[in-house]
Image (cartoon, rainbow, N blue to C red):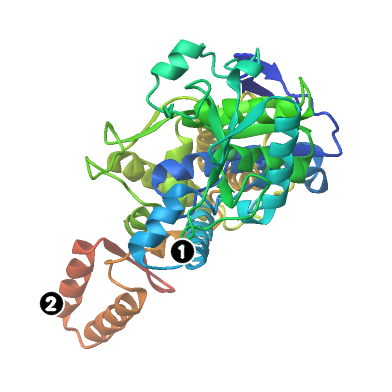
């Protein structure tokens, strides 16, 4: 396998060479847990799930360590807990549980390790102490700030110069900063706000130091891949690089930086003012998780993705096609042990999921035409293993065609009506029998009468 990844640090596609093939490490910034995940939050989860699967195929399950943190202390969490009138712990536990449920429904496997920021406060205090000792950080009015002028390479990852950074609205101007671009490592907490004792008084960490410390604790000073959405390149990842490289030495920290593109909804940026935030929870009530996942993978991860209801419908139709092909292959046994070379080659080329899906559709078309039993068995194996690699085609075709969404007529009601129709036919009451068939059709249920009885599917 020759995995190639676009490295944001070098701005080119590079051959991926792990530092140690027996210990491949990947760190991805995880959620700040204060509300339900929206569909934009799900994009990195699904993309890096594919990359983790790919690394596991190449290097072996036991040799890949995929770490995705949970940020459970941050000002947004403090604000939301106060607003809801609940404790921070209750809010973060509830939200993290919902996140796990939603991501599992999207077919994302759990990471190997999931550190929480509040479990690593000691490490944060220690790293901030090192940065102060090395003259890369200073204390001012209960805050500890990173001194960006102390690092000549600051801005290299994002390609921003100092003026761009200050012009960016994200830089907070404060009187105690030596330079407006300096960023917070530690900030004071008032008695009513969560805090920990430190050499600089009771306070709490800044967001950036959390990831520098959790990645070090799980993967060491230097590791292979760091991932996240491209909106995190500046300031979050730039600041992680600054902290970690100034604490541990130039050239340490992540060797490959992988960033996914932006996501818009029906052509618009998601924002509170537009009221177009789509939570994963809402979308799962409207469409199966596999359809949402397929829609997410239909664009290359570095490209912007416009999330539309038409796109989800198209994804559902494409899955119907693939499941129909599988249904027609139900008479042959498949060997699913190896992923089709064409699918793997597409993914190895900088995670080209649209190309991988094209290959999977081609396998389905070939299977639809094949007549030889061995050939059909081979294609079924390729379809299932390629699907599993992408995290789709994980259901029995009959279950897929019968699964509905909230608000759809239930399986129980359908079966009752089918029983009633059989009874009506036996009594030669064809008017009632036709009426049942038509009413089910209106609700998207198609009945198929065969010698063995009546089957049904949702269309
Ligand atoms: Zn992070």
Quadrant placement of the N terminus? top right
The answer to whether residue 269 is left or right of residue 336 is left
Q: Callout 2: few (<14), some (14-19), or many (20+) C-alpha neighbours within 10 Å?
A: few
The answer to which image quadrant residue 339 occupies is: top right
The percent coordinates of residue 170 (x first, y second) are 41, 28
> SS for tag 2?
helix
The percent coordinates of residue 201 (x first, y second) are 61, 49
Q: Nearer the viewer, mark 2 or mark 1?
A: 1
The percent coordinates of residue 157 (x first, y second) are 59, 19
Ligand 1 - quadrant of the structure image = top right
Ligand 1 closer than 8 Å to the CB at disc 1? Answer: no
The percent coordinates of residue 401 (x first, y second) are 41, 60
Front residue of 415 and 433:
415
Residue drawn at x 50%, y 55% is 327
Residue drawn at x 41%, y 72% is 451
- Whole-angstrom CA distance, mark 2 to mark 1, is 56 Å
The answer to which image quadrant residue 267 occupies is: top left
Which is more N-terminal, label 1 or label 2? 1
What residue does disc 2 label?
431
> SS for tag 1?
helix
Quadrant placement of the C terminus? bottom left
Q: Callout 1: few (<14), some (14-19), or many (20+) C-alpha neighbours within 10 Å?
A: many
Residue drawn at x 84%, y 34% is 21
Please tell me the numbered disc located at residue 91: 1
Point out the residue furthest to the front here.
141
């Amino acid at each position: 396998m020759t995995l190639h990844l676009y490295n944001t640090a070098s701005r080119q596609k590079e051959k991926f060479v792990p530092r140690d093939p027996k210990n491949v490490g990947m760190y991805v910034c995880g959620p700040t847990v204060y509300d339900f995940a929206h569909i934009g939050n799900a994009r990195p989860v699904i993309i890096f799930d594919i990359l983790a699967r790919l690394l596991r195929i190449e290097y072996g399950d036991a040799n890949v360590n995929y770490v995705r943190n949970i940020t459970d202390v941050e000002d947004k969490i403090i604000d939301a807990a106060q607003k809801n009138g609940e404790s921070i712990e209750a809010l973060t536990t509830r939200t993290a549980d919902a996140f796990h449920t939603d991501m599992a429904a999207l077919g994302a496997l759990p990471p190997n390790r999931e550190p929480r920021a509040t479990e690593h406060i000691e490490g944060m205090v220690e790293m901030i102490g090192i940065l102060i000792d090395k003259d890369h950080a200073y204390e001012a009015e209960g805050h500890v700030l990173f001194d960006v002028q102390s690092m000549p390479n600051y801005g290299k990852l994002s390609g921003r110069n100092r003026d761009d950074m200050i012009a960016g609205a994200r830089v907070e101007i404060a009187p105690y900063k030596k330079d407006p671009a300096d960023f917070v490592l530690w900030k004071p907490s008032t008695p009513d706000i969560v805090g920990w004792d430190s050499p600089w008084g009771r306070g709490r960490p800044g967001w950036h130091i959390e990831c520098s410390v959790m990645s070090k604790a799980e993967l060491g000073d230097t590791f292979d891949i760091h991932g996240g959405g491209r909106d995190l390149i500046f300031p979050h990842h730039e600041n992680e690089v600054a902290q970690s490289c100034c604490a541990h030495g130039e050239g340490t920290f992540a060797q490959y930086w992988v960033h996914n593109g932006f996501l818009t909804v029906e052509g618009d940026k998601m924002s509170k003012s537009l009221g177009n935030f789509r939570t994963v929870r809402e979308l799962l009530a409207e469409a199966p998780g596999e359809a949402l996942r397929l829609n997410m993978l239909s664009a290359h991860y570095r490209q912007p993705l416009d999330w539309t209801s038409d796109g989800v419908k198209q994804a559902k139709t494409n899955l119907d096609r693939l499941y129909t092909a599988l249904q027609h292959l139900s008479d042959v046994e498949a060997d699913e042990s190896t992923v089709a070379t064409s699918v793997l080659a597409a993914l190895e080329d900088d995670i080209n999921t649209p190309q991988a899906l094209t290959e999977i559709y081609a396998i389905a078309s070939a299977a639809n035409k094949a007549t030889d039993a061995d050939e059909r068995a081979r294609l079924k194996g390729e379809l299932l293993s390629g699907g599993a690699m992408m995290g789709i085609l994980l259901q029995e075709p009959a279950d897929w065609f019968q699964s509905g969404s909230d608000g759809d007529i239930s399986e129980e009601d359908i079966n009752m009506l089918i029983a009633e129709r059989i009874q009506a036919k036996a009594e030669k009451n064809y008017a009632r029998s036709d009426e049942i068939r038509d009413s089910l059709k209106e609700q998207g249920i198609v009945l198929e009468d065969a010698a063995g009885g009546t089957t049904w599917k949702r269309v």
